[in-house]
Amino acid sequence: MTEHMLTIDGQRIPFTEGQTIIEAATAAGVYIPHLCHNPEFKPHGSCKLCTVKVNGRNCSACTFPAADGQEVLNNTQELNETRRTITQMLFIEGNHFCPSCEKSGNCQLQAVGYYLNMLDAHFPFFYPSREVDASHHEVMLDRDRCILCELCVRASRDVDGKNVFALSGRGINSHLIVNSTTGKLKDTDISVDDKAVHVCPVGAILIKRKGFEVPIGERIYDGQDIGQVSLEHEMPIVEEAEHGR
Amino acid sequence: MAGKIKVATTSLAGCFGCHMSFLDIDERILALAEIAEFDRSPLTDIKHCSDQVDIGLVEGGLCNAENVHTLREFRESCKILVAVGACAINGGLPAMRNHIPLQECLEESYLDAVGVENPQIPNDVELPLLLNKVHPIHEVVKVDYFLPGCPPSADVFWKFLTDLASGAEPSLPYELVHYD
Ligand code: SF4
Ligand code: SF4
Ligand code: FES
């Protein structure tokens, strides 16, 4: 059997039929920054943080199939600057006040900002008005911090079988909606054990009474950058999927 | 004394936390004093910048008209202007009022809040007028460098100032970049 092979930044990376570029990269221990991608779910391809150059063209590594002989550029200054700009845009179109956010230190958006050495948001802020839903006794939804990655939508629909979340609206008015007659979380059958409650990469979906439980210094990204954390966590998931193929 | 770098600092809509954190450089301030002198700053109580300041450190965002005047004066006087801390960079916690109409904020604070005596919205001519929204400083003037953090740690100030003093392009390594 001939092994399939592509290169990322000149490094030879093997892949199996059906893998995306990001899956091949993860399995080989190469981090490609990403936010809406989570190897446990079908790709969504919305945040564009995983943009790589494939044979000279910009592509989303989380949706683009790996193919023999592809020359992929990933960790280049140009791509990382583009990614930083994308991250800055994610910050200005929400309301991200990290010092008062329960997710701070454990947040993937923030960690990507750190990874890309983002020191400011560059653009003027939108400060949009977004509704907080604190109606549920255990789960809380702060739309200010939602990056519209649809991970909760995918998790609730595909894993929990509950369909609690969906996206609605366009442009700056895009927002997460809750599938109940009142539009409130308290009138859904969501529960703290649901996958949907645990996949949010940012501090938009939180379990109540857990905020600031872990002291500064011991939070996920205090000691390790998101590249290391992500590979540690996602490599086994991708490998398992690979064996199942 | 000739040859020293002139440093000015100010606090706009901030909490002075960034200034306190700056002072956390502790005894390193002696080494800093060898190469730098403070110009306008709450630390010196000098009220206006002298003609040419080398580095201006700005804590806090813009919540009133006076903040805007101070910031513009700073920009004019300082060769290098630095946005220090979350409030200067994104408005910070004061900007959490931005999605509430100003009138409602004032009513809630001065008329309707629990325990308010003699309710009235302050309206003295001496008081700077509040802006409709709180803004980060880069929306009003050109900013040369950003030191994130709430507050940035003493090591951030130290790294930045020593980089500049040695003629290097200032940069913050991963472990010094924090938004909280
Ligand atoms: S969700 Fe993340 S980036 Fe947004 S405020 Fe919370 S910690 Fe900061
Ligand atoms: S709530 Fe969280 S998981 Fe759901 S779309 Fe928003 S950011 Fe993604
Ligand atoms: S991670 Fe690929 S588009 Fe979001």
Image: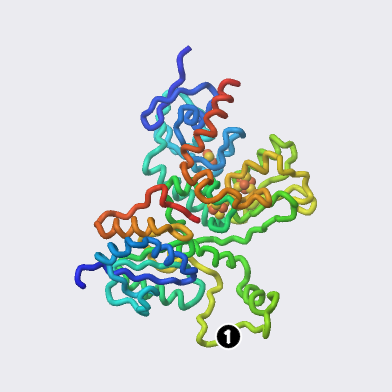
Q: Residue at x 31, y 69 (%)?
A: B7
Q: Is residue A73 left or right of residue A205?
A: left
Q: Is residue A142 left or right of residue B174?
A: right
Q: Quadrant of residue B47?
A: bottom left
Q: Quadrant of residue B79?
A: bottom left
A193 in relation to A1, above or below: below
Q: For ligand 1, tell me if the residue under mark 1 lies within 8 Å.
A: no
For the C terminus of chain A, give its image quadrant: top right
A68 in relation to B50, above or below: above
* Image x and y of residue A52, in percent: 44, 37
Q: Residue furthest front?
A: B27
Q: Residue at x 68, y 83 (%)?
A: B117
Q: Residues within 10 Å of mark 1 (few under 14, many from 20)?
A: few
Which of these two is toward me, B24 or A204?
B24
Which of these two is toward me, A108 or A151?
A108
Q: Give the total number of marks visible in the rendering.
A: 1
* Image x and y of residue A46, in percent: 56, 43
Residue at mark 1: B123
A171 in relation to A224, above or below: below
Which amino acid, by three-letter code, is at mark 1?
Asn
* Image x and y of residue A105, in percent: 53, 49
Q: Is residue A30 left or right of residue A142?
A: left
